[in-house]
Amino acid sequence: MEILNAIWPLLLMFAIFYFLLIRPQQKRQKAVQQMQSDLKKGDKVVTIGGMHGTVEALDESQVIIKSADGSKLTFDRAAIREVKESL
C-alpha cells in the first residue's frame, strides 16, 4: 500500500506534463507538417528566418520562393513557418 502512495504523485505529475506540454506540442507539430505538405504554387509564405514571399515552384523537399524584389530563393520545406491568408 505504501508503494501505491509513493507512485501516485509521480503518475499525477506525468499526466499533468502530458496534457500541458507533450500533447499540445504534438498537435502543433502535426499542424505544421500538414501545412508544409499542403503548400502549393502561389501561396504567400513566411520562412522561419522572417522572409516573406510567394511560392514559385516546389518539389518533395524544397520550395522556390519569389521575394518582393523578384529574386528567387530556394528553401527546404521545413523552413516555411506559415502560409499567409490572401485577401
Image: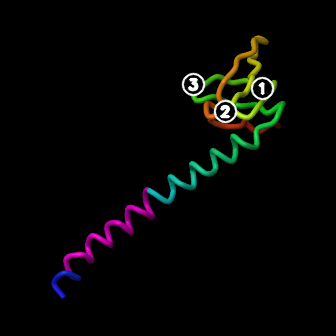
Which residue is depicted at the point 32% across and 72% down? 11
* Distance Cα–Cα, label 3 vs label 2: 13 Å
Tag 3 residue = 49
Q: Position of residue 61 (x, y in %)?
A: 69, 32
Q: Relative to 40, say whether 64 is above or below.
A: above
Q: Quadrant of residue 16?
A: bottom left
| Residue at image location 75% in from the left, 11% down from the top | 71
Please tell me how crowded label 3 is: few (under 14), some (14-19), or many (20+) other residues with Cα within 10 Å.
Answer: few
Secondary structure under the numbered disc 2 in the rendered image: helix
Tell me the crowding category of disc 2: few under 14, some 14 to 19, or many 20 or more residues within 10 angstroms, Cα based. Answer: many
Residue at horizontal 78%, vertical 29%?
Answer: 58
Of helix, strand and loop, which one carries label 3? loop
Whether 17 is drawn above or below 62: the answer is: below
Numbered circle sitting on residue 8: none
Q: Residue at x 38, y 69 (%)?
A: 15
Tell me the kind of residue under disc 1.
Thr
The x, y position of residue 66, in whole percent, is 77, 19
Where residue 36 sits: x, y (%)?
69, 40
Mark 1: few/some/many CA within 10 Å (<14, 14-19, 20+): many
Residue 13 part of the magenta-drawn span:
yes
Residue 32, placed above or below residue 59: below
Q: Is the magenta stretch mostly helix, strand or loop?
A: helix
Q: Which amino acid does label 3 sit on?
A: Gly
**Residue 67 inside the magenta-drawn segment:** no
Q: Which residues, given as a range, are shown in magenta?
A: 5-21
User: On the rendered structure, is 38 left or right of 10?
Assistant: right
Please report contact status of discs 3 and 1: CB closer than 8 Å, yes or no. no
Q: Earlier in the sequence, mark 2 or mark 1?
A: 1
Quadrant containing the C terminus is top right
Q: Name the residue under label 1.
A: 54
Camera-side residue of 61 and 43: 61
Per the image, the residue denoted by label 2 is 77
